[in-house]
Every structure is written in C-alpha cells, then in structure tokens.
Image (spheres, helix red, strand yellow):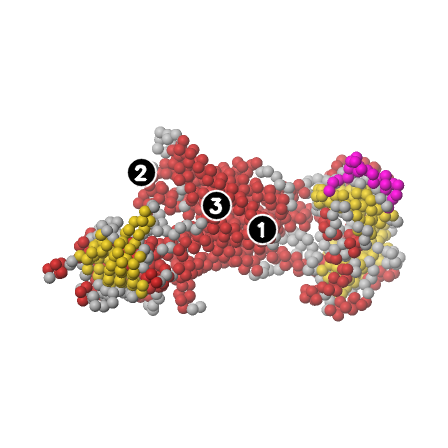
Amino acid sequence: MSRPALRLARFSARGLARDLRAADVRALFVALALAVAASTMIGFFLDRLDRGLTRQASQLLGGDLVLEQARPFDDALRAELEEAGLVLSDQIDMVSMVSFDDAFQPASLKVVDDRYPLYGAAEVDLGEGVETLARGPAPGEVWLAPRLALLLEAQVGDRVRIGESELKVGGLVEREPDQSAGFGSFNPRLMMHIDDIGDTALVQDGSRVEFELLGAGPPDLLEALTPLLERLRRDGVEVRDVRRDRPGLGNALERAERYLSLAGLAAVLLAGVAVAMSTRRYVDRHLDTAALLRCFGATQGELSRLFALQLLWLALAASLLGAALGLAGQAGLLALLTAFLPLELPPPGALPLWLGVFTALAVLVGFAGPTLLRLKKVSALKVLRRELDPLPASAWLVVAVASAVFGGLLWLYSGDLGLAVALLLGGLVMLVVLWGLGRLLLAGVLRLAARLPRGEGEAGLSQALRLGGAQLARRRTASLGQLLAFAVTFFAMAMIAMVRGDLLTTWQAQLPEETPNHFAINIQPHEREAFEAALGDAADARSALYPMVRGRITAINGETPRDAVPPESRGDNALRRELNLTWRETLPEGNRLVAGRWFDATAEGGGDWFDEVAAEPGVATVPISLEDGLAERFGLGLGDTLTFTIGADEVVGEVQSLRDLDWDSFRPNFYVIFPPGVLERFGHSFITAFHLDEERRELTRELVRDFPGVTLLNVDAILAQVRELLTQVTRAVELVLAFVLLAGVSVLYAALTASRPVRAHESGLLRVFGAGNRLLSRVQGAEFAILGLASGLMGALLAELATAGLYLAWLDLAPRPHPWLWLALPLGGALAIGAIGHLLSRDLRRQAPAASLGLLGET
Amino acid sequence: MKATSQRNTTPILHAEHLCKEVASGERRLTILNDLALSVFPGETVAILGQSGAGKSTLLGLLAGLDLPTSGELSMFGHLLAELDEDGRARLRAGRVGFVFQNFQLLPTLTALENVMLPLELSPRAGAEARAREWLERVGLGERLDHLPKQLSGGEQQRVALARAFVTGAELVFADEPTGNLDPDTGERIIEALFALNREAGTTLVLVTHDHALARRCDRSLRLDHGRLTEMMTLDEVSA
C-alpha cells in the first residue's frame, strides 16, 4: 500500500472509531451485521446440507455410479469401467416368494457380492444385538428384514426356502447403507450372496430381474466417463450418477429451504432499508466535515475514498460479527434439524462467509451509494454559508440503484433470474403505487389534522393529534420516505410471518391426524366388498380402493419409447418397468388438474371410445390422464398417445389431461389413470390406504387372518418420521423469522434515529413557544402512531399481494387472503412505532430548547 | 510590517474586474462589481462592510471556495479560473488557513483531533506533536482531549486559531472571528490571532464589521455596493 493510501486508511479508521459514538453509525453497523448474519446463517446451513447430501448421495445410491438393466452386464463394459479406475460391485434385484414352514411371503431380493457395500455399512442383528457391518451376507446365508422374519415367523438360525434353495437366516438387517428413505418397495427385504443365486434357479430367461453394476470412483473419473454414460443411456441402460441423481429432500424440506432463502433475502432487504435510512443521517452529519476538508484542500476523490473507506471498515467489522452470529445461528438450525437429518454434515465451508461479506458490501453500495455521493459534491463554500447543502440524491436514483443491487442479490440467492426480475419489477411497481398512496395519505392526514377541534386543555388528545399530524404532513418528503421504509419493513416482516403460518398450515393439512398409516395391496376383486366391510369406518372417501392393472409402455406416438423420449429419459424407470395403471370416474383426492379436462362420458362424444374399445380392443384410442412430472420427463403434452401392453393386449391412450399430485401424501398415486370401462377386462387387484388409530390396531390381525392374500403395510414409523421432520423444520423456520423481526426492528431504529434532529428541532420550537412535557410527549406519540398506522396499512396491502404472487410462483402453495393482517399490521404498526419512537425521543423531551435547536445539522 | 513596504513584490492574492452575480428569483443580483484587490505576502488586510454587503462572498472567492461570475483572480500566482474544484483544493492544501465566525470545529473530534485535521491532508512528520504545540501556544495545553461542546466559545475559537496556523499556512482567512464572542473574549482572540500571525509571518485577510479590529490591520478596505475602497490608516492621515 502506498504511503498516501496508508495514510488515508489510517485517517478513515480513526474517523470511524470516533464516529462509533453516533447513533446512525451504530444503526448502520447493526443493520449490516444482521444482513450478514441472516445470509451467512442460511448460507452456511444450506451449504452444509448440500455438501452433506452430495457426500451421502454415493452411500444412498450404493455407489458413485449405478448402472441398471434387465440382463447381465457384459465383460467388455466391466473391463472398460475398471480400466477407467472404478471399483465395481454386482448386484441383482428381484421379487420372489420366500417360505418358511407353511408361511409364504413375497420378498424383495437384493443379491450382493463380496465387494458390497461400496460405501457405508449395514446394521444387522446377527442374534446378539444390532451390529454395524461393512459387508453383505456370506454365501449360504440370508439376511431378512425384521418384518419379513415376523411375517414368516422365522428367526436367526432357521432355514428359509428361496426358489430351489434353502438358506440359513444369518441375521436381521435393520438398515441397509444404500436404502433410501421412503417406502419404494412394498415387499420386505431379503439379502443374499450372489454365489447362491444360481442354485435358486430364479434367474431364467424372461424373469423380471434387474442387474445392477455399482461403481465407486472420484468425481473427475465420472466426468471422464460422461460420453460412455450417455451412450449407455441411449442403449436403454438406466444410469444413476451421484452428480445428477442425488436423493431429493422431499417437498417439506425443499419448501423450507426456499422459505429460508426467502427469509434471508427479506432480512437483507430490511437491513438495506435500515442502511439507506441511517446513511441519510450519516451524510447529513458529515456535510460539515466534508466542507471543512474541502476547505483544507481535500479533493473530491480523497473525500470519496475517505468516506468509502470508513464505511468499508464498518462493513468489514459488521461482517465479522454477522458471520459469527451466522455461524452460531446455523449451528442452531442444525441442532433443530439433527433429529431428522440422516447424515453427518461436513463442517461449514468458506463460501457462505464470502457471500455474507459480499452481501454486506453490496447492501452498502446499493442502499447507501447514491446518498453517499452527496458528500463528494459538498461545496467548500458551505463553511461560510451553512445553507449550501448539496442537493439530496434523487429518490428515484436511490431506489433504482438499491433495486438493481437487491435484484442481483435475489438472483444470486434464488438462482432464478426470472423470479428475481419478476419480484423486482413487482416490487418497483408496488413502490410507485405506495408512493402515490403515501402522498394521498399524508395530504389526508394534513386535512384531517386541520379539522380537529382545538380542545380546551393544552395537552388534549385532539390537540396532540392535530399538531402531530400537521408536523408529519408538513415534512412531506421526509415523512414519505419514512412511510415507505416502514411499509416495506412491515411488509417483509408480515410476509415472512404469513408464509411461515401458511407453510405450517399446509404441512399440517398435508398430514392430518387421519393420514393413512396402512396400505393394503393385492386385494382381489372378489375380496373387495368383504375387505371394505371389514375396514368399516376406518376407510373413508379419501381412502378409496383403486383397481390396479400392470402394463408396460411399448410405444409413444407410435414410436418405440426410447426413440420418442428425450435422450436423458431413455433409461427412465417408467419405461423399463410395468406401471400400475388404474381407472377412475372422478379425480382422485390430492390430485390437481393442470391441463386438459377430466373424463366425462356424458359429454358429447365423450363416451364414443367405450363402444370403439369394445368393438375393436387395442385399436381404438382411449383418453388417459397423465401425471405432469412424467409428461415433462418424456416431453409429452395433451393429444400425445401412449401404447400400453397389458398381458397380450395393447391399449392406446391419448393424453386428455395432466395431473399434479403429491407423492408425499401417503395415498395410492398413479402415473396413468384410465376412464372406467377400458381396463376392467384385464386381471386386476385393488390397493388402498387407510388410517387405523392405536386402539383399533387389532383390526390388522383380523385383516391378515381373513384376507391372507392381501399384503398389509404399516407406515406409522415413516409417518412419525415425516411429522418429526415438519416439527423440526418449523422450529428452524421460526428461528429465521426471529432474525427477520430483528432486522425489522433495526429499520425502525435507524429511521427514527435519522429523523431525530428534525424532531428535536420541532420539539425545541414547541418548547420555546410554551409547550409542556405532556403535550410534547403526546404530539410525538400521535405523530409516530399515525406514521405506524399508515405504514401498517400500506405494508398489509403489499404483503397480501406479494405473498399471493410468491405462493403461485415459487412456493407452490394456494394463495389465500389474510383478513387479520389488515387489522393487525396498522394497529401493531401504530403501537410498535409509537412505543419505539416515544422511547427514543424521551431524552429529547428532557433537553433544553437551546440544545434541541442546536442539534439540527450537527451530531 | 506595513503595506507600503510590500507593494514591490508579487501579490499573494490578486483580483481584477471581479464580479459576482447571483440569481434572486428571476432577477440577477450583483454582489461584487468590477472589484480589484491585491494582497501581498505578510500583509494583514481587513475587509469592512455592512451586513449583507457581500464580505463573506468576497472571502469565499478570494479563498477559491467559489468562482466569480467574471474577472480574474489569482492565488499564489495561479489563476483560480484555470483550476477545477480539485485543483483549487490542492492549491489550498497546507498553504491556506481559515478562522470562522462559528468556529467550524467538528463536534465528534477532540481539540487535538480538530487541530490535526488539516495535517491529515498534508501529512508531515510529528503531526500530533505539532498540533499539541500549537494548542499549547493558544493556552489549551491542558484541554487537548476535550470535545468542542466541553469548551467555551473563546476556547473553541482558540482551537480554530491553532488549526488555522498548524500547517504553516502562508495565508489565513478569518471571517468575523469575534462575531460569536463577547467583547472581552473577542479581544483576547484578536490578540492571539495577531500574535500568531506575527510569529508565523502569515498573510491575513480578515472580514469584519468591527472598525476597531480593522484598525489593527495594515490595510482596511471597505466593501460598499460591490466595490472595494481603500480606507486610510491613521498613520497615512497624519503623514
């Protein structure tokens, strides 16, 4: 650093140290620290979660790379992968019956080799408690899921029959390292060694077997294999790659992530508003300094550098404190979510810290920059003529620069340019509307104040309202600025609180008390009525029995599926397996039509297909409803056709509607739904989900006894886990909300501090003219309360509109009105601003008029 | 040092045909009209005038804080019109001191820090020691760490005096330096100002409406209707 630069740095640091006594500098510091704290807290947490998930993804997938197809992998491919440096492990997945004594149960077989598992370890009870083992079952033995052992009434040491083999139960597998959360497979697990599969004679030509080749290797190795993997995808091999196929977080956590990002941005916005308010006062206070320094020979450049450096030191110090708070906060968030998160998260990285510091600087430049330029423009002549203040920065310039910077931050944090632009434009439009509304409100206040009766007593309420209202309306520009700042503050606080409330309501509605906790599959048509009767009132309209037919997609728009879908979807599971198809007259509970129309056989021509199908099965095209996620993956829309092979027949369906559905709903969900009258002729069974509370659990025993062919699954544990997750996420959300509220309070503090000298001056004048302490107190109280009331109203309008937009565009929630907001925000605003303002003005009321009058333009 | 002995050297300040007009509503108001002035090194010059005569405007122009509407003005041999705002600031740095009627001390700085302020811009070794020394010379050696609000008006103006001279300025402008002080305190400040000026050999341009103060200067000029007229000194009258 050159000597002049070092001198300037020292000078600015000394100046800042002296300035720390000033309220505006303290407000600036607090606002910046809060912005950094909020962004780093959320950044650190999301970063750790992200890196943790990537690290764990390999374990959950079973390897860094998983290839899957219906036939064994050839040696050439193995050689190619091994030569590239991957460690390979073979695995076979299939469903087969397992028997012990007289008990038979379908089981999901996982056949593993000696290299299993490539990552992690299994938790297995070998008969002496649960142990962690980094291996699979040895040749000659099997490990059973506890549920399978229970259903078979088999124990460790017993011998169970699989195909043509009899193998010893070596252990009960409590947890597999590569078992993703959820209940993807209805059949309980059986693990065995690959050396034993031949003797079972289960793998025959045409058997439904999935061969998997799992590979472990560093990320750059996978990168080098990209062309090979693309080729395999095109050949119909399902390729799961740790870089692309990380396990999802589920709806609740994804929404929570978005909420956290949104809350972080709200805190940054509020901090920005606080910075803008404090900077006005900071600049006003330093105009004399700048003029004096100009007098003593400082150039404009030196002045700019001096004040910019002062604020840079402030921002860096605030960043340090903010980052420390953010680190503590993310540890808090993590502690709240630890019970749910199945992974051990790596320590926080440095990126969020830099992002936090960058955020502080961006907020400073964006929200303070244009205002600070006033200091550079100050004329040295001001030392002789005090009134020669440089013109205030144009309000529109301040808003434009702040918006551009905040828009950039929105983009940076959301990663969604469209959303950032939309929010920004919406915000600017609203700001203009609020500005107009604010002007009208202030004009109204002035008119109302003038009409208020003068009253008898000097400190009467009407007198206070009249004077307070008039003072507010007379300082129109300053009041308008405060009104907008408070409105934005209330808006951001209310929005974050509302979104939190609505998220919780949605989550609660998603898993109400009567959420199904049991699934029943394989209910045969002849058992249907008896089963429904046995369920009694445990079943309701929402837990309907769905018929289920298995069919495979064999053509899309007349082409082979692999040619018809985008290359990245060629290995999609839905193309490689039989799908569960159902038929239904009405839209299932929890499904939402997003395009097209639901089946209506009564509509004109709506039932023609039925006769056509009956006359010429396999030729006529019938309407179908498709899940929109699948449609998106396959690039399908309304009017496209899918051919299903069901048994020996083919059925062609034309997409008539697209449905959005909640896969986390604990109800049967289907990719494809047919109208009634098409699939009935095929062999089918029924599936249902129902809720049984604790005291009716004996019903399951009766069902198992009376319907031995029906498979019952109890998902209570998963349900409890999801509920626990929602509770934890709720706490995390509340912690973040607290930060946003703090940022809001910092705005109130900054704004009231900024207006303190003008208020002091007015109080001094009133005091000179004979106003007593009581009147002063009431006038100030009235002024703050009117300000709070008006900004609360404007904030409510903004919050209501913004949340509706956010719900639709970002959080995937249904917009809903919040009538309480229109009462709570104006009243709360009047109370909050009244109380804080009254408190902050207490010492002003105690000040002698001479001191109050002298405050203007000084410290 | 009398003015007559200085007139053969180059003026430190020189103004010719100086005009200053300002807008007053739709009209143009002439504050200074075809004004001429030369100030020579080491001189003490008082500019007298009624309130509103344009004394402070003239001081602002002479110090390069403002630009004339027309006319030529030079400081230290540099034409101010040829310099931009920053150029004029650089010209002042370390060479020009100011004393203001309202002291213009920064309220968040101590007396010592206020005096050190101009040194921060024209750094030289031992800035703090130098500032201490000047504060001691104005009798405030015991009050270095006091904030302006903890000092009386006279003390604040003494801090301002120390600040004006601390850089070793060649030229000091004083704008009604006793305007905010009672007569006794004002008298003591003037004594101090002239003593420091003598010791430092500085050129002093002083704006005042106080004739007694003006009489202590080498020359007194009256600003009237935008023009300067030289007032005769007692010596000149008696000569």
Q: Is residue B119 visible?
A: no
The first of marks 2 and 3 along the sequence is: 3
Question: At which x and y percent is residue A534?
Answer: 80, 37
CA–CA distance in space, label 1 to label 2: 52 Å
Secondary element type, mark 2: loop
Mainly helix, strand or loop, the magenta region? loop
Q: What residue does disc 1 label?
A: A420
Q: Is residue A147 left or right of residue A841?
A: right
Q: CA distance from mark 2 to mark 3?
A: 32 Å
Whether residue A784 is visible: yes
SS state under label 3: helix
Residue A48, image x and y in percent? 61, 57
Q: Which residue is mark 3?
A: A485
Amino acid at the residue labelled 2: Phe
Q: Residue at x 27, y 60 (%)?
A: B15
Question: Does dot 1 land on a helix, a strand or a loop?
Answer: helix
Write down the chain letter for disc 1: A
- Residue annotated with mark 2: A769
**Circles 2 and 3 in contact, beta carbons < 8 Å:** no
Provide the residue span drawn in magenta: A596-618
> What's under tag 1, amino acid-wise?
Ala
Quadrant in the picture for residue A246: bottom right
Name the residue at the left extreme: B238
Crowding near the residue tagged with mark 2, few <14, some 14–19, many ≥20 C-alpha atoms within 10 Å = few
Dot placed on the residue nearer the N-terminal end, 1 or 2? 1
Q: In the rendered image, which quarter contains the N terminus of chain A?
A: bottom left
